[in-house]
Image: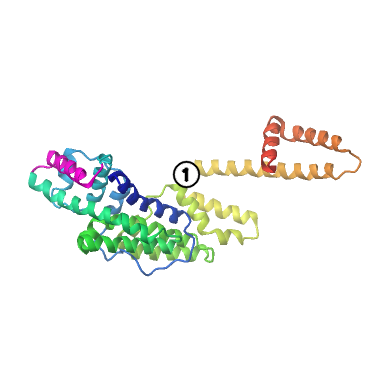
Amino acid sequence: MTWKKIAAAAAAIAAIIIIIIVFAARKHKQEGYVLDATSKIRFKDADIYLTGRDFNADNVKEYFANDVINPYTLKYFIFLDEKFKDVRSREELLEKVREYLYSVMPSYDEADKLFAVYQTYTDCQLGLHDKMKSWGSPASPEDAIDYLHKLQEYRRDVFGKDDADALYGPSVMAEEYPIRRGMIIGDRNLYGEAKEKRLAQLKKEMWGKDADQADDFLEPLNRYNDKLQMYGRDLGEMKSDDDRRARVREFRREFFSPDQVQKLEEVDNTLAREKSRESDYFDQESKIRNNPSFNDDEKSAKIRELQDQMFGVEADAFRRRLTIEKGE
């Protein structure tokens, strides 16, 4: 097996976590954090893991001037994996990485220190490849968190707890938090206010004094959609459409500019008009189909005439859509 395949298998962890985040909708648990606010990891450390980095000879010297294990180390090792992804053996990989580090680090001594950590990291990845087979893929958010526990415990066995948490901790917290956050947001049994309180508690317990920064990685549109999902039960139980629209407008004002809110409302109005027009059309189509005074050909002709009248230049597109929906 080539190193490229092994690295790809280890990278599958990230894909598994993403899938679980997307479908996270089970009851939230506060207990059992892999890492939390009592660790030395700060939100800025997780941000380093989440954002892109351009590693070159100059900034590598800066990143590892004080300690070879820091928030940049894992990101740099991932960079090295990608740089030498086509090598076919562990020995070849390590030799190429050693030569490369000698060329970019200030001294052989500093390069050797970083290389020693990378060598252990490589062996950890190789061992992880076999572990992943026995663990299987998580099928729920709770399983995904248990999966993160297993990953980190294995890494602690290899590196020791302090080094493993310093090296992998930011990535673990960057993965664990969205899973737990998604579990809260997707809980259909809770109202929005209860979810807001649980989210605040989650941020405090995981990020401590950095709690206010926990959702900085989300774009306004993502945060708005999360808000709609968070208050899904509240909105669904509102008896008045006007009240529901007013609440949604409040959410939009929380995340978007006045111009953006206006454009969203214009889209809503357009969709509402189209929905009303289609409802009116289907009512009239039903009357034609149920009119015993028309034969089948006459019904088809009158329905086509109705479509042309109501949808104008969009009539052909409407007919194509109906054909697709009917599976014809």
Dominant secondary structure (helix, strand or loop) of the stretch shown in magenta: helix
Choose top left, top right, bottom left or bottom right for residue 299. Answer: top right
Viewer-side residue, 28 vs 152: 152
Q: Secondary structure at mark 1?
A: loop
Range drawn in magenta? 88-107
Residue type highlighted by circle 1: Ser
Residue furthest to the front in view is: 1
Residue furthest to the top in view is: 313
Looking at the image, residue 314 sits to the left or right of residue 101; the answer is: right
Please rate how many residues cluster around mark 1, counting C-alpha atoms within 10 Å: few if below 14, some from 14 to 19, many from 20: few
Image coordinates for residue 92, horizontal then vertical, percent: 20, 43
Residue 216 seen in this snapshot: no
* Residue sitting at x 54%, y 63%: 188
Image coordinates for residue 168, horizontal then vertical, percent: 27, 56
Residue 52 seen in this snapshot: yes
98 drawn magenta: yes
Relative to 130, does residue 292 appear above or below in the rendering?
Answer: above
Looking at the image, residue 285 sits to the left or right of residue 105; the answer is: right
The residue at which mark 1 appears reads as 257
Viewer-side residue, 157 vs 187: 157
Viewer-side residue, 279 vs 150: 150
Relative to 63, does residue 298 appear above or below in the rendering?
Answer: above
Image coordinates for residue 86, horizontal then vertical, percent: 28, 39
Q: How many marks?
A: 1
211 drawn magenta: no
